[in-house]
Image (cartoon, rainbow, N blue to C red):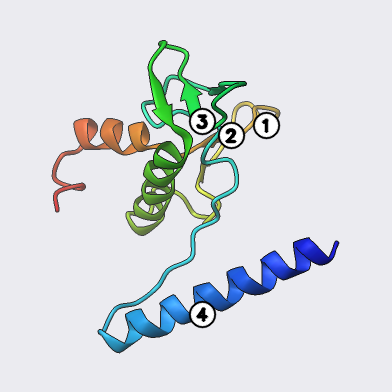
Amino acid sequence: MLRQRFHGWLHRRLATLIEAKFAETGGRVEYVYARGTSSWAFDGSGKLKRDAKHYELATFSTGKQYNCDLNASYNIAARYWAWKLKLTRRKDGQLPEDKSSPGKPRMPVTLSTLWQREQEAPHLCAA
């Protein structure tokens, strides 16, 4: 329990320091809800499987292997841009469910969501 509190305090202090340093240079920090970003493949192929020996490796359903942290960072960035481009109404990075099927679970935003959006309307996602 103490270990968990200590981790929380250090995390909050680190986040505050980074935010202050970034504000000094004129930047602005946005927080993104990161839960579940490492469990979905950034290429849209579905849920990931973690390697038992090398837990940092994620195996996609297509057979590719990536680092879990790199995969999660892609998905966190995609959640931010989906929120910024108003593809989602919430910061948790999930697409709204269909009105016709209320029991359907929400689909998380991954990097592939932005790729699909760019193909549909390239003028909206131009940098």
Q: Which residue is mark 2?
A: 99
**Mark 1 or mark 3, which has the lower sequence index?**
3
Q: Which residue is mark 3?
A: 40
Which residue is at a point 67% across and 74% down the rendered structure image? 9
Q: Tell me the amino acid under the disc marked 3.
A: Trp
Q: Tell me the amino acid under the disc marked 2.
A: Lys
Quadrant containing the N terminus in the rendered view: bottom right
Q: Exactly how many numbered labels are in the figure?
A: 4
Q: CA distance from mark 2 to mark 3?
A: 24 Å
Task: Check the image and name the residue furthest to the bottom.
Answer: 24
Q: Tell me the amino acid under the disc marked 4.
A: Thr
Q: CA distance from mark 1 to mark 2?
A: 6 Å
Q: Secondary structure at mark 3?
A: loop
Which residue is at a point 62% across and 72% down the rendered structure image? 10
Give whichever of 96, 45 is nearer the camera: 45
> Which of the 4 image quadrants contains residue 112?
top left
Q: Which residue is mark 1?
A: 102
Which residue is at a point 33% across and 79% down the rendered structure image? 22
